[in-house]
C-alpha cells in the first residue's frame, strides 16, 4: 500500500472493506430510504467504528418540496415505493428505531 502526501492510508482500506456492502445495499434500494440505517447496522455487526458530523449549517437555495418535488415524482413515475424499500431493508438487516444514539464525549 502506498502512502501519499504523508496521509494515513486507513480511509482507503476502510472504503475497500465497506464497498461490497454499499454495492449490496444500494442494489436493493433505488430510493436510498433505509440505506444509511442498513449500512450502520452492518457496520455495528462488523465491529467498525464510525464518527458523526454534527451541527452542519447549510442554506437551501430553493424550497424543499418534499413529496411534490422532482425526486419523489421520479420515484412515482418509475413505480418505486420508498417506504416498501425501507421496510424491506429493515427486515433484511434487522435494524429498528431508534438506531442512533447520542454519545457524550
Image (cartoon, rainbow, N blue to C red):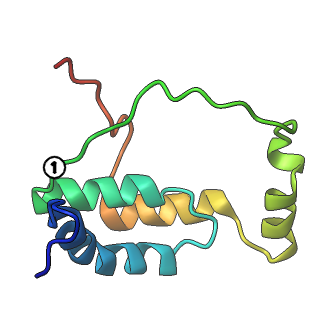
Q: Quadrant of residue 77?
A: bottom right
Q: Residue at x 80, y 58 (%)?
A: 72
Residue found 25% across the figure and 62% down from its top? 42
- The percent coordinates of residue 100 (x first, y second) are 33, 36
Say which quarter of the image contains residue 98.
top left
Is 83 rendered above or below residue 78? above
Please give the residue where the numbered disc 1 appears in the rendered image: 49
In x, y percent, where is residue 101? 29, 29
* Quarter location, residue 5: bottom left
Residue 58, how many percent across, how many down? 64, 31
Q: Nearer the viewer, residue 54 or 20?
A: 54
- Which element is circle 1 on? loop
User: Depth check: 32 or 87 in front?
Assistant: 32
23 relative to 3 in the view: left or right:
right
* Residue projecting furthest to the front: 5
Q: Nearer the viewer, residue 91 or 12?
A: 12
Question: Quarter of the image containing the C terminus?
Answer: top left
Quarter of the picture holding the N terminus: bottom left
Q: Is residue 53 left or right of residue 43?
A: right
Q: Count the marks: how many?
A: 1
Residue at 18% x, 60% y is: 7
Q: How dense is the environment of label 1, judged by Cα within 10 Å: few (below 14), some, or many (20 and up)? A: few
Q: Is residue 76 above or below residue 67?
A: below
- Residue sitting at x 63%, y 56%: 83
Q: Position of residue 67 (x, y in %)?
A: 82, 47
- Residue 44, compared with residue 30, is above or below; it is above
Amino acid at each position: 500500500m502506498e502512502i501519499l502526501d504523508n496521509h494515513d492510508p486507513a480511509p482507503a482500506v476502510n472504503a475497500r472493506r465497506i464497498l461490497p456492502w454499499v454495492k449490496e445495499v444500494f442494489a436493493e434500494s433505488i430510493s436510498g430510504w433505509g440505506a444509511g440505517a442498513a449500512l450502520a447496522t452492518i457496520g455495528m455487526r462488523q465491529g467498525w467504528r464510525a464518527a458523526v458530523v454534527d451541527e452542519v449549517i447549510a442554506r437551501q437555495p430553493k424550497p424543499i418540496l418534499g413529496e411534490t418535488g422532482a425526486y419523489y415524482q421520479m420515484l412515482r413515475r418509475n413505480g418505486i415505493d420508498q417506504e416498501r424499500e425501507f421496510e424491506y431493508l429493515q427486515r433484511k438487516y434487522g435494524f429498528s428505531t431508534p438506531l442512533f444514539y447520542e454519545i457524550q464525549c
